[in-house]
Image (spheres, grey):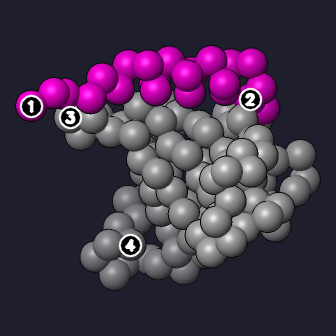
Amino acid sequence: MSRFDFSGLAQSAIDLVTLFGAPGVAVIPGVSQLAGSEPWRGKDCGGSKDVTIEIAITDWLESEIDGTLIRRGDKQGWTFPPATGEDLSLAGSVVQNNTTYSVEDILIINPASEVLAYRFNLRR
């Protein structure tokens, strides 16, 4: 059985964010900014948490648009796990350059349970 090498995909994500990335904010709904918040235990679930990220937002290739999950006009956003260790798989929206995108789907690139990058399907 062959093994998939994630290093090429991870390097492509690094290059994309390095070349085209800009500061943005991932908004995680239902999480308080207060220290010690544990929304998964039903505590302090109001509000949202803003996580500063570096994200590259690009168009999808025409061949990737299926009209259902990925629609015409959607964008893809590539980013890395923030230094703060926040789980971006819970993000509900992304804001960059005063434009807010809703997160429709998230691909987490995590070989051996180590998150290398996130790819968001973003919709305005």
The residue pinned by badge 3 equals: 112
Residue bearing mark 1: 1
Tell me which numbered mark, 3 or 2, is placed earlier along the sequence.
2
**Could you tell whether 42 is left or right of 80 in the image?**
left
Give the quarter of the image for residue 54: top right
SS state under label 2: loop
Task: Name the residue beneath numbered marker 2.
Answer: 21
Residue at mark 4: 39
Q: CA distance from mark 3 to mark 4?
A: 26 Å
Which amino acid is tagged 4? Pro
Verify whether residue 13 appears in magenta. yes
| Labelled pair 4, 2 in contact (Cβ < 8 Å) | no
Residue at 50% over, 68% down: 31
Find the distance from the CA under tag 3 to the CA under tag 2: 26 Å
In this view of the protein, which residue sits in the foreground, 34 or 7? Answer: 7
Nearest to N terminus: mark 2 or mark 1: 1
Find residue 123 and report its image quarter.
bottom right
Kindly state the secondary structure of the residue where label 1 is placed: loop
